[in-house]
Amino acid sequence: MGWTSCLVGRVVRGMIRQRMVACYRKIGSVGVTMINVIVILEIDPARVDEFLEVITFNAAESVKEPGCTRFEVNRQFEQPNLFALSEQYVDQAAMEAHYQTPHFALWKEKSATGFVTKRWSVKGPVLD
């Protein structure tokens, strides 16, 4: 598969995800609250490749969950061992279900080995 096919696939998936979010936001007016999770991670510079292997797998599996509308991994330009995770769930139950998945368990197991040197996070409802 060429890079153009991959790019088109990502664009289409992004468009579908945006439409899903719009639908869930409409549902939100009758009691469902979208949840965002923002995590900032500083990684041991010697273990960035190990981190990337685990987090990209976790992200790819997470967006397959029915309640996860976004799981993105961003890398800081000036500090290549600093990352931001941006996750969105249709509600708190979906976020909690994410924490029970095998790929999240693998993330917890691998991250406990010490490649994360600092961690900050914010979890909560999307404010209207």
Image (cartoon, grey):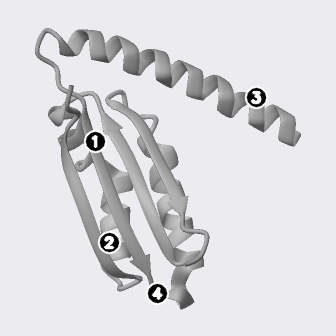
Looking at the image, the residue that sits furthest to the left is: 31
Looking at numbered disc 1 in the image, what kind of residue is underneath it? Asn
User: Circles 4 and 2: CB distance less than 8 Å?
Assistant: no
**Badge 1 density bin: few <14, some 14–19, many ≥20, Cα 10 Å:** many
Q: Nearer the viewer, mark 4 or mark 1?
A: 1
Question: 63 above or below 55?
Answer: above
Looking at numbered disc 2 in the image, what kind of residue is underneath it? Glu
Q: Which mark is residue 79?
A: none
Label 2 residue SS: helix
Residue drawn at x 30%, y 60% is 105
From the image, tell me which residue sits under label 4. 44
Q: Earlier in the sequence, mark 4 or mark 1?
A: 1
Quarter of the image holding residue 115? bottom left
Quarter of the image holding residue 31? top left
Q: Position of residue 71 (x, y in %)?
A: 44, 44
User: Circles 1 and 3: CB distance less than 8 Å?
Assistant: no
Question: 11 above or below 73?
Answer: above
Going by the image, does 45 lie left or right of 95? right
User: Circles 4 and 3: CB distance less than 8 Å?
Assistant: no
Residue drawn at x 20%, y 16% is 28
**Badge 4 density bin: few <14, some 14–19, many ≥20, Cα 10 Å:** some
From the image, tell me which residue sits under label 3. 8
Residue 89 or residue 102, whichever sits in front: 89
**Badge 3 density bin: few <14, some 14–19, many ≥20, Cα 10 Å:** few
From the image, tell me which residue sits under label 2. 109
Q: Position of residue 103 (x, y in %)?
A: 39, 54
**Badge 2 density bin: few <14, some 14–19, many ≥20, Cα 10 Å:** few
User: Circles 2 and 1: CB distance less than 8 Å?
Assistant: no
From the image, tell me which residue sits under label 1. 36
Q: Split into 4 quadrants, where in the image is the N terminus?
A: top right
Residue drawn at x 49%, y 24% is 17
Looking at numbered disc 3 in the image, what kind of residue is underneath it? Val
